Structure formats: C-alpha cells, structure tokens
C-alpha cells in the first residue's frame, strides 16, 4: 500500500529530539515498521497547491495521515477529483475537520483519529490560558523583560479565577477535563452548553449546570472556553452578532479550532473592550499568515492576548500517545480488523460520531 503522511517540519529541533515524533524527520516513528511490512511511506510537509507533494502523491495513496497541527486540507474537490484510491484518512491527533467529511462519506472513505490521545494536554493548556488572561500575565512578563516596574499598570486589569463563572461551549472529553481542573479554583459557577447534555451523574460530579440556550449561556459566563469540533454548525459561530451576547469584558479561550471564531469580529471585540481577552493556539488557517490579526491584537489596556502557535495537543507526552494510536489504527487496518469505535469519525458512508453537528445519518450506537 502507499501511505502518504503530511506532517510538520521539525528542523534542528526534530534532529536533536527524537521524541518529536510528528515531524517530517521522525515520521511518527513508523518508517522502519512500514518498510518491514512492504509498504511505501511518503512523508512531506509540502501541502499547499496543486504542485505540492501532497497533491501530487494523493492520487496513488491508499492511506493519508496528517495532523491537525499542520493539516493537509482534504477538500471535497480533492476527494472527488484526485483521491481516487484513498480508503483511509487518518488524523494523528484529535479533530478531523481538515477533511471534508460529507465528501468522505460520499466516497466511502473511512476517517479515523486517535480519540482522547491529547485531551489532557489540551485541558491543561486551557487552564493555563484562562489564568494567563484573567491574571493579565503576558503584559506583566513583557514588562519584567523590558526592565520596567509599574505594578498598577498590570494590576488594574488583573483578577482572580476564584468567584468567576466559567463555561465550556462543548462538554465532551476536553470540556469535561477543563471543568474538572478548574473546580478547585472555587469558581462562582461552572456552566456548559452542548446539544449532547452530559449524563446527570457526571454533571453532578463536576458541579456543572447545563444552559440549553447559547445566548443565555454566554451572557452568564465571565470565562468561555470553546471545546466543540469545527463543523457546519460551529464554523464562524462566534461572530460579531454573537459577541454582543457575551458578558462585557469576558475572556475567551479557544483551543478547539480557529475557524469557530470570526477573526475580524474577535479583533474588533477585543479592541473595543467588549471582550477583555482572547487566548488559544488554533488559527484559521495553519500555519497562520504573518499578518494574522490575532498575532498582535490587544485590548485597550495593551493586554488580553495569549495566543500561541498550535501546540497544546502536541506536547512530547501527547506525541507518544497519538503516534502509538496511529500505529494501532494502521495495524488493525492492514489486518482487516474493526477499529476502536471511539476512533471512527465516518465509515461506510455514515457518521460514526455524534460530535460533528446535527447530522441525521448517525450509525446506531455511535459515540
Ligand atoms: P469530543 O467529541 O469528546 O467532544 C466534543 C463535544 O462538542 C461533544 O460533546 C459535542 O456534542 C459538542 N458539540 C459539537 N457541536 C457543538 C455545538 N454546536 N455546540 C455545543 N457543543 C457542541 O471532542 P474532544 O476530544 O473534547 O475535542 C474537541 C475538539 O477540540 C476537537 O474536535 C478538536 O477540534 C479540538 N482539539 C484541539 C487540540 C489542540 O491541540 N488544540 C487537540 C485536540 C482536540
């Protein structure tokens, strides 16, 4: 079989650190294993445009592996016009929105990912981002580096997480882990919004209240963390109209997908003070253009931005887990064995997950 992997280039870091598995250099740690099985394994980071290695190799590929950190965008056009042999699109990580899932269904391509592999890594990052914004960390650190000392300039926009209303938009694996992790900070209340409400015993254990109306949910939260997948129902969801329904001065942490938030609307809401901060690691598109407004946007007091490149789910611990999971999915695929149900996003022309919107064609018993 021909297996095509689009990974990010790790350069000197990847040569010095072999645990950077999801790099072009270290090839998810699978090169010799795949070779020993007689498969052709092509690894590249070159993914944009018709002359890219990705698009040139796609027509012969049986399997495409990519990561959300440097995604090969498998659009409907590519699936219909170029990916004629493709049978499996495998995400080394979590979140397969870089694949046009409807087109994959149409062509009966299986889409699988390593569900759960990096959810703890992301949840920790979310807590860090919340504290970063609420405590006004970035301007304070920049001041220290500059050699200045003006405590009031920082403290005038620094708060405690304790006593705040914290809500997650999307309460699946990551959303729940975030709620669990912020509970010891003694928030005023923990809220969530999700069209798949949690079982009562889990919600009670987390101390989280479901608010079934999105605008009412947003209007109550001091901090909103976004943990829903990107799909037709969430693309551009947080736009200038919806931002008016946030509590004035709220903080937003989005480690889900950049395209859930309208990039200009976020910048304008931050600059006007409608929101006090925005943080996360996901961008629309990736790599983010140098002039992407989220790199430099600020609130009126010169803070409120804790954006980073997309790395929350690609810590060295996470890379080991999703590289192992990718190998497991491939092993089952080669042997014709069933996949772990939680790892399957679409199969046999049907959605196997309830997480990707209000699709009606769920398989019975899907996760
Ligand atoms: P999950 O499937 O366990 O949970 C997602 C939840 O979102 C589900 O409960 C689903 O019902 C809910 N949801 C879907 N659409 C919604 C909507 N319109 N409104 C409210 N809720 C909605 O997924 P997960 O493991 O928690 O991951 C969530 C997302 O986080 C992934 O899809 C991915 O995009 C992102 N992610 C990012 C990174 C990173 O490195 N930044 C890593 C892993 C995952």
Image: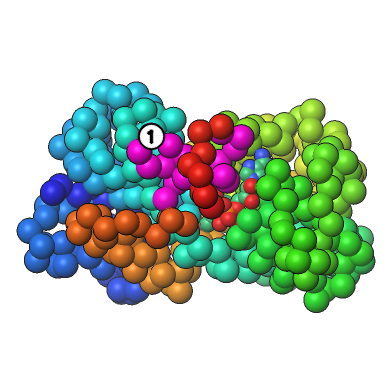
Q: Is residue 345 magenta?
A: yes
Q: Position of residue 121 (x, y in %)?
A: 55, 67
Image quadrant where residue 334 sits: bottom left
Q: Position of residue 129 (x, y in %)?
A: 69, 62
Residue located 82% across and 73% down the image: 185
Q: Position of residue 245 (x, y in %)?
A: 86, 36
User: Quick check: 306 left or right of 336?
Assistant: right
User: Quick check: 146 left or right of 346?
Assistant: right
Q: Is residue 300 magenta?
A: no
Residue 148 visible in the current orientation: no
360 vs 322, nearest the viewer = 360
159 vs 353, nearest the viewer = 353
Residue located 92% across and 64% down the image: 188
Residue 217 visible in the current orientation: yes
Q: Position of residue 62 (x, y in %)?
A: 20, 43
245 vs 91, nearest the viewer = 91
The magenta stretch is 344-359
Q: Secondary structure at mark 1?
A: loop
Q: Which residue is mark 1?
A: 349
Residue located 9% across and 66% down the image: 36
Model colouring: rainbow
Residue located 15% across and 37% down the image: 60
User: Quick check: 283 left or right of 109?
Assistant: right
How many residues crowd mark 1 within 10 Å: few (<14), some (14–19), many (20+)? some
User: Quick check: 351 left or right of 8?
Assistant: right
Relative to 219, say whether 151 is above or below: below
- Magenta stretch prevailing secondary structure: loop
């Amino acid at each position: 079989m021909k297996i095509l992997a689009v990974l990010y280039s790790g350069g000197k870091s990847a040569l010095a650190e072999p645990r950077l598995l999801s790099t072009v250099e270290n090839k998810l740690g699978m090169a010799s294993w795949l070779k020993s099985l007689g498969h052709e394994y092509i690894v590249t980071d070159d993914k944009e445009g018709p002359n890219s290695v990705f698009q040139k190799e796609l027509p012969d590929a049986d399997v495409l592996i990519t990561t959300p950190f440097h995604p090969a965008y498998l659009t409907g056009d590519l699936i219909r016009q170029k990916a004629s042999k493709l049978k499996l699109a495998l995400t080394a990580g979590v979140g397969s929105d870089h694949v046009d899932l409807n087109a994959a269904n149409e062509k009966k391509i299986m889409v699988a990912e390593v569900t759960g592999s990096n959810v703890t890594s992301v949840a920790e990052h979310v807590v860090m981002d919340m504290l970063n914004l609420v405590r006004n960390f970035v301007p304070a650190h920049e001041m220290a580096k500059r050699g200045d000392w003006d405590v009031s300039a920082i403290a005038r926009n620094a708060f405690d997480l304790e006593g705040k209303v914290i809500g997650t938009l999307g309460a699946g694996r990551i959303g729940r882990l975030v709620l669990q992790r912020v509970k010891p900070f003694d928030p005023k209340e923990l809220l969530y919004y999700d069209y798949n409400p949690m079982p009562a015993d889990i919600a009670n254990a987390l101390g989280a209240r479901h608010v079934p109306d999105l605008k009412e949910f947003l209007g109550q939260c001091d901090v909103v963390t976004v943990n829903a997948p990107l799909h037709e129902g969430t693309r551009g969801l947080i736009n200038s109209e919806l931002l008016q329904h946030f509590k004035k001065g709220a903080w937003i942490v989005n480690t889900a997908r950049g395209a859930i938030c309208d990039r200009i609307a976020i910048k304008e809401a931050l600059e006007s003070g409608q929101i006090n901060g925005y943080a996360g690691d996901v961008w629309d598109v990736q790599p983010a253009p140098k002039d992407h407004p989220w790199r430099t946007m600020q609130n009126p007091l010169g803070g409120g931005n804790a954006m980073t490149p997309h790395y929350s789910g690609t810590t060295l611990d996470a890379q080991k887990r999703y590289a192992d999971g990718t190998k497991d999915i491939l092993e089952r695929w080669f042997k014709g064995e069933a996949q772990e149900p939680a790892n399957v996003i679409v199969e046999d022309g049907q959605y196997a997950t309830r997480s990707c919107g209000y699709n009606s064609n769920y398989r019975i018993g899907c996760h």
